[in-house]
Image: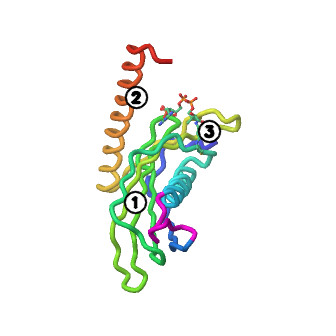
Amino acid sequence: MPTVEELPAAASRVEMTQMVLPPDTNMHGTLFGGRLLQWIDICGAIAAQRHCRTKVVTASMDDMHFSVPIQEGDVVILWATVNYVHRSSMEVGVRVEREAPLTGERVHAATSYLTYVALDESGKPHPIPKVRAETPGERRRYNDAITRREFRLARRAAMDARQALEGEG
Ligand SMILES: CC(C)(COP(=O)(O)OP(=O)(O)OC[C@H]1O[C@@H](n2cnc3c(N)ncnc32)[C@H](O)[C@@H]1OP(=O)(O)O)[C@@H](O)C(=O)NCCC(=O)NCCS
C-alpha cells in the first residue's frame, strides 16, 4: 500500500487512442454507446490505479451525454485524470474527442465522471493518497469534483428519505 500523503493530479493522467472498427458499431454504422462506455471505464480505471497503485472497482458513473456521432473509421482519443480523492474513493474525469483520420479535425464528443474505490488485499475499501491540483485547470476540476460529490450524496439521501417515507424495502 502506498504511504505518501499526496500525489500530483498529473501523475495519474492517461491518454488512450482507439480506432472505430466494424465490431464497435451499431446498426447505424456509428460507434455503439456501450463500447464507448467500456473504453471510458478502462481509461478511467488506469488513471485511478496510477494514482493509488492498488486494485480499484468502479463504484459509479455519472450521467453520460453523447454530443456527436462517431463513425466507423474515426479515431477516438480519451484522456483521464484523477480529479479528487475523498478517503478510499476518487473521482476520475474522462474527456473524449473524435478525430477525423484524414483531416485530423478534433471535436469534443463526451465527458464522463466516474468514481472508483481503492481496495486492499482483502477486497475492502482502503484509504489512498490525496490528489494535489497544481494548475488552474486541475484546481477547477478539483473544486468541481467536490461539488459533484455533494450533489451525488444529496441525491442519494433524498432517495433514501423518500423510500423510508414510503416504507419501501
Ligand atoms: C464500491 C464498493 C467497494 C463500496 O463498498 P462499501 O462496502 O459500500 O464501502 P463503503 O460504504 O465503506 O464506502 C467506501 C467508499 O466508496 C464510496 N462509495 C460507495 N458506493 C458508492 C457509489 N455508488 N458511488 C460513489 N461512491 C461510492 C463511499 O462514498 C466511500 O468513499 P470514501 O471512502 O472516499 O468516503 C462496493 O459497493 C462494491 O464492490 N461494488 C461493486 C463494484 C463493481 O463490481 N464494479 C464493477 C466492476 S469493477
**Location of residue 55 (image quadrant):** top right
Amino acid type, mark 3: Leu
Q: Is residue 12 visible?
A: no
- The image's mark for residue 156 is 2
From this view, report whether residue 63 is shown above or below residue 97: above
Q: Nearer the viewer, residue 116 or 5?
A: 116
Extent of the magenta region:
23-33
Does the closest atom of ligand 1 sit within 8 Å of the Cβ of label 1?
no
Amino acid type, mark 2: Arg
From this view, report whether residue 11 is shown above or below residue 155: below
| Number of the front mark, 3 or 2 | 2
Residue holding disc 1: 95
- Residue plotted at (43% across, 82% down): 101
Helix, strand or loop status at disc 1: strand
Position of residue 141 measured from the top left corner of the image (x, y, whole percent): 34, 50
Question: Whole-Å distance between the Cαs marked 3 and 2?
Answer: 22 Å
Amino acid type, mark 1: Arg
Does the closest atom of ligand 1 sit within 8 Å of the Cβ of label 3?
yes
| Number of the front mark, 1 or 3 | 1
Question: Whole-Å distance between the Cαs marked 1 and 3?
Answer: 25 Å
From this view, report whether residue 158 is shown above or below residue 17: above
Residue holding disc 3: 119
Does the closest atom of ligand 1 sit within 8 Å of the Cβ of label 2?
yes
Q: Nearer the viewer, residue 20 or 99?
A: 20
- The image's mark for residue 169 is none
- Residue plotted at (38% across, 35% down): 152
